[in-house]
Image (cartoon, rainbow, N blue to C red):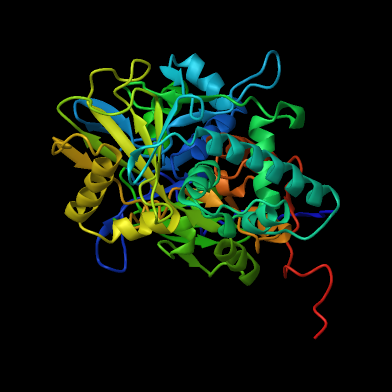
Amino acid sequence: MLGFIALPLLFPTSLAVAISDPVHENKQGLSSAHRHVEALILGGGVAGVIAARTFHEEGIDDFLIVEARNELGGRLKSATFGGKTIELGANWIQGTQTGNGPENPILTLAKKHNLRTQYNDLFGSLTTYDNNGAVNYLDVVDTSIDAFVNHTIYSGTRLTQNLVDLSSRSAYDLIGVKPRDIHAKAAEYFNVDFEYAQKPDQNSAIAGSWNNNFTYDIDQGGFSEENLLSIDQRGFKAFIQEEANTFLKPRQLRLKSTVKSISWSDSGVRVVLKDGTTISANYALCTFSLGVLQNDDVLFIPKLPDYKLEAIASMTMATYTKIFLKFPKKFWFDTEMALYADPERGHYPVWQSLDHKHFLPGSGLIFVTVTGDYSKRIEALPDSQVKAEVLNVLQSMFPNITVPPPLDFYFPRWTSDPLYRGSYSNWPPSFVQQHHVNLRSNVDRLYFAGEATSMKYYGFLHGAYFEGLDVAQSIIKCITHQSCVRVEHFDKAQNGIPYDI
């Protein structure tokens, strides 16, 4: 269905600036070094590092990774808290391997670099609470798990029958699942929001179905149902940093360098950094998060085509926020997880104990997760108010004790951080396949890759891995003059059947 067109392969000398060129002055009068490379990779997360490795493996070493942070990893972001390394962002290898079936490439790298992980029994090691304390509604959770499976089957059937997409809320309604009380709503949250970082009415039923199946359902080519929690004190980022160390040379990496503008054409790409440095390249790969693209944090010259802008605007950058507390000693549940049901849906619902025999015993660490609009809400509040709200929930969960003040408290603000603008992408019901083709398509010699551009695995680390690999291979074909092609974009995303009004 998708056509391919050839791209020009000429690169004018006016854009090519040798590494040895003298220092020039930019428009602000600041001295600015210039450099030219064959391939420029913008962003040092999983997609960027795997793209760089792919170039290296094909004998193309004239590349440069530009990363705004002081280390590689992207949204693999850890911090020292309460004397331990905690994961602010990605934390799990989601889907591992079943028998001799396909192995999640993140697991492959984790094993290669001796990453310490632990099976996380999310649903099987669970204690339930509500605003009156400990209440056993595990049967409600089990019913909700069954409902999610049926929702996935129903939505997959709609896909095979070429029916229009629905929200997950509509799909639930159509299979007779309508959570009424706070326990059922909390259980639904645990199945939907905790995974997609969006409410059921904000989530695509069909895309959510294949997204789940291609990762977890071995009958659909998935890896396994298993989730491994990283507890490595080097940080989860260690697997991609150590992989980069196997091939990356100092001249191929520039850290602490924020991109200000990207000029693109059919002849090449020129990038200006915030310090005034300019870098030109025959080809460039942009791995910035969907949120960064949506918030105009980087200027594109000329502006991206309307079809591209519509695709960027139409997908969702969701936010998943972990709120960490350090206490003098553990006073909470002995299971790995806890679920709290509040009259307000999404009010500090999913808790995880790191002070557990399988994780970081004796650490005194616990965290609670909020998502979506609630994440944005707490980002706008002072830490003191969020801490007070969290402690009030803990007091409701444990009414027979006096919850002590924490020794430390912390949560990241992903949405307001200009390097991320959220945690990971999600597919809303109004986002159609033509949008995704346009999101993924290149504009002349500027290419795009990341978890958001993965149709099967959007939102997952392995989605970023596969996209970095695949798009780099496309660029390599251009560099080596094999067959420089790109997926034909859609000038307009259209309905299959026009509205008749």
Is residue 113 or residue 326 the one in the foreground? 326
Residue that appears at 65% across and 64% down: 430
Is residue 93 or residue 248 the one in the foreground? 93
Residue 165 figure quarter: bottom right
Give x and y (percent) for residue 266: 63, 60
Give x and y (percent) for residue 287: 51, 47
Residue that appears at 53% across and 51% down: 425
Asked if residue 455 can be seen in this view, the reply is no
Residue 112 in the figure: left or right of residue 418: right
Residue 212 in the figure: left or right of residue 373: right
* For residue 432, above or below residue 413: below
> Which residue appears farthest toward the bottom when viewing the image?
501
Give x and y (percent) for residue 182: 46, 50
Number of callouts in the render? Answer: 0
* For residue 404, above or below residue 151: above
* For residue 415, above or below residue 152: below
Asked if residue 338 can be seen in this view, the reply is yes
Q: Quadrant of the C terminus?
A: bottom right
Residue 411 in the figure: left or right of residue 303: left
Is residue 362 or residue 143 the one in the foreground? 143
Give x and y (percent) for residue 273: 36, 55
